[in-house]
Image (tube, grey):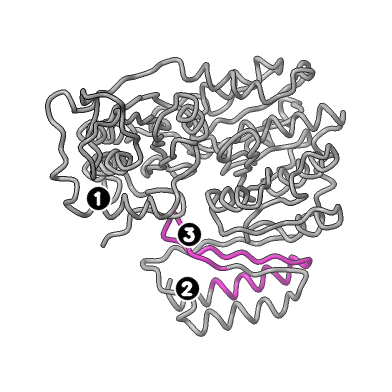
Amino acid sequence: MDKLFGTDGIRGVANQFPMTGEIAMTVGRAVAYVLRSHLSPVKSSVPIGLKPLDSNKPVRRAKIVVGKDTRLSGYMLEQALASGICSMGADVILIGPLPTPGVAFVTQSMRADAGIMISASHNAYRDNGIKIFSSDGYKLPDEIENEIERLVFSKDMDKHRPTEDLVGKAFRIEDVHGRYIVFLKSIFPRELDLMGMRIVLDCANGAAYRVAPLVFEELGAEVIRKGVSPNGLNINDKCGALYPENIGDAVVEYRADIGISLDGDGDRCILSDENGEIVDGDQIIGLCALQMAQEKVLKGSTVVTTPMSNIGLELTLKENGISMLRAPVGDRYVVDAMRKGGFNLGGEQSGHVVFLDQSTTGDGVVAALRVLEAMRRTHKPLSELKKGIRLFPQIKENIRVAKREPLDSKPEIMKAINDAQSKIGSRGRVFVRYSGTEPLVRIMVEGEDEVVIAELARTLVSTIKSSIG
């Protein structure tokens, strides 16, 4: 069977498998179909929705929120998903461009049964993707994704096509941006404001282009807007969280207090301090962890990260009595580990930072607000706050591959990895994996000596290219 779901939903080149209109429509049908087994029967003799698969009792009609980022292909996929959902008897609420965490929020607040975000996150405009949230705003567990995937390639749904008044409806709601802005502002303490602060904000011409500037402006900041003119083709195009040097340069140019770079779907955030120096996800997690621990609100005195997080962060947290738990790469796995352990702070070096007391997934605006709160409470600039998080040099390389051959089936690759780790020792790490969203092998080498790790990274790249590149 063909594989649809990766580490963060379904993703690929728009209008090519798996991101075609046909697949999107079938995914919409499958999501609505799966929901039917979770809906409670209603106390009425009049059918107001689909019948459950194993009962003659009527159930209420399912309601599914569909949002998107600013990619051109979003129009095609939005309509295809809506068509599939309606064809299985569920209703669709179309909310247009809104950040991924905003879709999760709206799904919760509107008591919807599921939410779907159409986005390829930080990828270029030619790609697109589908992320699915359950009614509580969390991404679907693997077993539900596997069932949806099975249904897409089976004919199980064909005999359950509703007709007449049981076909679903689609509604478009225009005021979700205001609701989300009010929610984001409520996260910032009422006794604080951003009066007198100058912020350079890069929205990557993506989903946050409308809401993010207004949040910071309504809290009192002067906002220099960048990347807020989407045209369907320029999302993530040399802007946003993938190009943080842009925001660093702009902060210096405008003499701003902070720079904030979001990605195309608004779920990740990279910062710049007042000197134009980049503050990545590890540093954001670290400085927030120290602040939360001081305020005694860091649950379990533990932070959840991934194998990509810098060992310097781990050592710094340990020195301050904070444990660091590493979950598999992917913000959904970080969130899973946080929920299982009862922790409230986690994230990834890439800028996905999750504050589980406020949001069910990574939210770039929330992360920026929490850093701004720390700056206001301590009366310190970001450059001073980040000094407490010392990071080791880290080299990253990506190798594009034609096919995914198991790395552990290549003795020469495993030997190169083991040799590199032996040379670095306990004060460094080597991590090699396949990307969950692109046909890439990702290499990360870190240690105290940048010259040594650069040479080790070059050796790994050469070995992998000769083996599977």
Residue 28, percent from left and from top: 28, 39
Q: On the image, numbered disc 3 is attached to which residue? A: 435
Residue 460 highlighted magenta (yes or no): yes
On screen, residue 408 versus residue 347, left or right, reads left
- Which of the marked residues, 3 or 2, is nearer the chain's N terminus? 3
Q: Which of the pair 190/301 is nearer the observer? A: 301
Which residue carries the number 1 mark? 152
Q: Residue at x 52, y 39 (%)?
A: 238
Range drawn in magenta? 432-461
Q: Nearer the viewer, mark 3 or mark 2?
A: 3
User: CB of mark 3 within 8 Å of CB of mark 2?
Assistant: no
| Disc 2 element | helix
Q: Which mark is residue 465?
A: 2
The residue under the point 36% across, 43% down is 126
Q: Is residue 415 above or below residue 388?
A: below
**Spot occupied by residue 343 in the image (x, y as percentages of width and height):** 68, 47
Give the side of residue 133 with respect to residue 169, left or right: right
Q: Is residue 402 above or below residue 184?
A: below
Using the numbered discs, state the Cα–Cα distance from disc 1 to disc 3 in whole angstroms: 24 Å
Tags 1 and 2 touching, CB below 8 Å: no
